[in-house]
Amino acid sequence: MSSDTKPLTTSADHLDDHSAAASRLRIATFRLARRMRTQRAVDSMSDGQFAVLAALWVHGSHTLGELAERERVSAPSMNRTVNCLQESGYVSRAADESDGRKVVISLTDAGRAVVDETARRRDAWVEAALADLTPAERETLDAAAELMQRMVAR
């Protein structure tokens, strides 16, 4: 092979590049998520409990079945989570106005405060981490965030 030609890459090399990139992205995303989860308003609250509060904050009131489906857990598991959140005053249960047989779970003011404070702490942590980066690195991460949003929307 002459010095001005490059070795040919095979489709296997291309797949290996994708595989390595996927692995690096998975690990970095997991580590970032784990680090951000430490920034919460209530230290004793589980990730699953906070996910329910966040779902109610973003999407509004749900039935137990809807919450279980959204969070991909069984109805009995969601019932235990909601019971715990209700005992702590973060959610309330009420009969559905259009169908009294259904029970609707809603976020209370205390639950809203937990979500707001947790989001504030997480944003502050990310802002501090971004402050240590160059403007070009921040632009790269901003573009990556947009791409990641597209990936999860698939």
Image: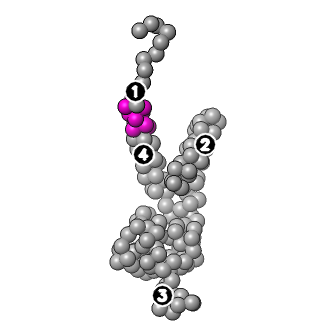
Packing grade of label 2 (10 A; few <14, some 14-19, many >=20) is few
Q: Position of residue 18 (x, y in %)?
A: 43, 37
Mark 2 and mark 3 residues within 8 Å of each other at the beta carbon: no
> For mark 4, what is the residue?
26
Give 77 or 101, whichever is nearer the viewer. 101
- Tell me the residue that label 2 is attached to: 143
The answer to which of marks 3 and 1 sits earlier in the sequence is: 1
Q: What kind of secondary structure does the magenta stretch mostly adopt?
A: helix
Disc 1 vs disc 2: which is toward the camera? 1
The answer to which of marks 4 and 1 sits earlier in the sequence is 1
* Disc 2 from disc 4: Cα separation: 17 Å
Quadrant hosting residue 138: top right
Nearer-the-camera pick, 90 or 59:
59
The residue singled out by tag 3 in the image is: 102
Residue beneath the point at 46% across and 7% down: 3
Highlighted range, magenta = 12-21
Tell me which numbered mark, 2 or 4, is placed earlier along the sequence.
4
Q: Along the polypeptide, which appears first: circle 4 or circle 3? A: 4
Mark 3, Cα crowd under 10 Å, few <14 / some 14-19 / many 20+, is some
